[in-house]
Image (cartoon, rainbow, N blue to C red):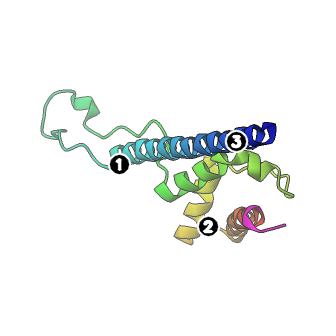
Amino acid sequence: MSDKLFKEACMMREKNIMNFVRGLNKEFARRRKAAEQTVGNKIDQTTSTPSSVNSTSTVLIPFGAKLPPLSRLYEPEVVRVWDFLHSFSDVFSSSDSQTLLPSLDSIQDAFDCLKANECDQSKRSNATQLFKGIAIDLCKVISPR
């Protein structure tokens, strides 16, 4: 009789753990979706020009020119790569590379350098090395040991 109760208790524990894992996965997905929507909305707001500004208005004449943004504009792909790397930073820091994760600015600089084809050879080489390092770290994490 005690064996049956023990097996039943183990099954119920396993069932509760699986329900907990499912709920945790749903919560992580919900939070990631909310973060992506927030960042996407912020990127859309910063890249679109406000249509309510009237350039012929005489109010605030010294400020007729558009003020520079308070922060740097980032490509959405760069923000997604940076967010992914830093969301799972514990996985990448435990890999064999033992390197620091790149900053958002360094990824954006490398992206701009490779996209524009107007930077010198050393900057281009550094940008290539950065993206190659990110790709290698991603492959190390997903490959079986």
**Disc 3 element:** helix
> Which callout, 3 or 1, points at the residue further toward the start of the chain?
3
Question: Considering depth in this image, is 47 or 142 the residue closer to the camera?
Answer: 142
How far from the left and from the top, in percent, is residue 79? 53, 51
Where is residue 96? Give x, y as percent: 87, 58
Cβ atoms at labels 1 and 2 below 8 Å apart: no
For the point 24% across and 43% down, the residue is 50
Which one is nearer the viewer's eye here, 6 or 26?
6
Q: CA distance from mark 2 to mark 3?
A: 67 Å
Identify which amino acid the numbered label 1 is placed on.
Asp
Any magenta on residue 8?
no
Q: To which residue does mark 2 refer?
A: 119
Percent position of residue 124, x then y: 67, 68
Label 3 crowd bin: few (<14), some (14–19), many (20+), radius 10 Å: few
Q: Which residues are magenta?
A: 141-145
Find the distance from the CA under tag 1 to the CA under tag 2.
Answer: 28 Å
Mark closer to the chain start, 2 or 3: 3
Question: Mark 1 vs mark 2: which is more N-terminal?
Answer: 1
Q: Residue at x 46, y 47 (%)?
A: 33
Q: Secondary structure at mark 2?
A: loop
Depth check, mark 1 against mark 2: the one in front is 1
116 in relation to 81, above or below = below
Residue sitting at 35 percent across and 48 percent down?
Answer: 44
- The kind of residue tagged 3 is Glu
Separation of marks 3 and 1 at Cα, in angstroms? 54 Å
Residue placed under numbered mark 1 in the picture: 44
Left or right: residue 76 versus residue 85 is left
The image shows residue 57, relative to residue 135, as above or below, that is above
Q: Left of 74 or right of it: where is 62?
A: left
* Left or right for 29, reference 107: left
Which residue in the protein does label 3 denote? 8
